[in-house]
Amino acid sequence: MPLYPWIQLKRYIEQVIMFPFVLAGKLVARLNPLPEKEYDLFCFFPIYGLGGAEKVHASVLRAVPDKKVIVFFTRKSDEVEMKRFFTLPHVTIKDISRYTDNKWLYAFNFLYRGICAQYINQQDHAPAVFNGQCNFAYKLFPHIRKNILKTELIHNAEKRFGWITFPYIPVIDKRAMITQLIIDQHINYYRELGIPSLYDSRITQIQNTVPVPKQYTVHSPGDTLKVYYAGRSGWPKRLHLILEIARKALAAQLPIEFHFAGNFESEIPADIRPHIHWHGLITDEKSMYDLHKQMDVLIMTSAFEGFPLSIMEAMSCGVAIVSTAVDGIRGNIIDGVAGLLIHETEEEAIVTSGLEKLKRLSADRELLQQISRNNYEYAVTHFSEAKFNKAYRDLFNFKD
């Protein structure tokens, strides 16, 4: 017997158990209405911290400047300064993480499902609801009226997160995913679990956007290859593999410089810290693009990814990519054209392969320059802001 009916049964049981809390939350919302009555779009995002997903969420908000939007953040954000990306004239921000991301007050998480459902359901004109891969929002969706459009964005094909989403497939009207490979992987998950094929058509592809410079900057690599990683740490990024590649390159005295930027300075080992270039936490777009333009190769060793904005930004500046061949990356990075892909899966082999690919680009500057030009042209063709904005307006059924 397919597993999917059991997944649905589990969801129904949870909804019955949660019903008293949800009902109480709806009563609370009636007594404490939102400051403004009508909103066109309700958004639910986990955090406003450092990361590509958060930048995409902010870009979605900028795609609808003519609409009234309210955003709920449901988890505690460490990089408080990143909140400014969401602080827009047409956007109201509600940080409810104190109640929805607190194990000592977790009953309030249940209560807020009712509060938010009531805020949405009582709108005179049915709004759209957008979930930026937020656990809280999935559990909220069943309590929202059926005639209200429920949408979401999935950033990657990681099956462990999929288990959070699978129970709610019937109540999600539209699912946006960023690459065809991620869509294909989710369809495979559907078939494995016995999810009916009628839900396949609810998935649509929307490519992310990044600013692309109007002119190509010619890369003229010097004697030293400049390699960098910029972003966050965390186990999916496998930063320790990049650091090991740097350690081996330094030990071999290769003509390679390593540069790092992000929130992980404490994770740089003491033995290589004096020999790498540390750029700190970069929070503004201009400084980030200045770094991209100075570099030759962006390296990533992630266990899984969507199609990271850091790679898109790097490509738009003519930077070559060396990365593990995972998910959306292998769907956009053609090996030998946009960079060099690491197909190995064991960590030791990833380090060896990554180092060999950096050696190749260091030795073959003609290939490096050709990749640089290819990447800029790819960015011009594929990373259009106008296409992105139209796609999300269509997702929300907003008319221009």
Image (cartoon, grey):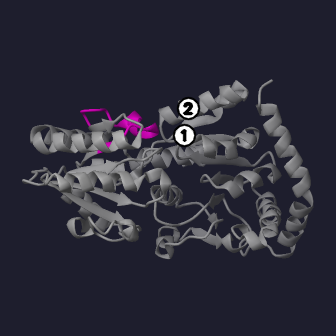
| 131, 367: nearer the viewer | 367
- Note whether residue 226 is visible: no
Q: Is residue 31 left or right of residue 375?
A: right
Q: Residue 332 lies in magenta, yes or no?
A: yes
Q: Residue at x 39, y 66 (%)?
A: 267
Crowding near pointer 2: few (<14 within 10 Å), some, many (20+)? some
Q: Are marks 2 and 1 in contact (CB under 8 Å)?
A: yes
The picture places residue 59, in percent across and down from the top left corner, at 47, 57
Residue type (three-letter) at the residue carrying disc 2: Gln
The picture places residue 372, in percent across and down from the top left corner, at 20, 44
Q: Which numbered dot is residue 125?
A: none
| 37, 165: nearer the viewer | 165
Q: Residue at x 52, y 44 (%)?
A: 156
Measure the alpha-carbon separation of dots 2 and 1.
6 Å
Question: Which residue, given by chain and number where applicable, does mark 2 sit on?
Answer: 185
Q: Residue at x 29, y 47 (%)?
A: 315
The picture places residue 346, in percent across and down from the top left corner, at 41, 39
Secondary structure under the numbered disc 1 in the rendered image: loop
Q: Is residue 115 left or right of residue 389?
A: right
Residue type (three-letter) at the residue carrying disc 1: Ala
Crowding near pointer 1: few (<14 within 10 Å), some, many (20+)? many
Instruction: Looking at this view, name the residue that lies furthest to the left.
Output: 223
**What's drawn in magenta, residue-wise?**
322-338
Question: Which residue, given by chain and number where applicable, does mark 1 sit on?
Answer: 157
Q: Quadrant of the N terminus?
A: top right
The picture places residue 274, in percent across and down from the top left corner, at 22, 70
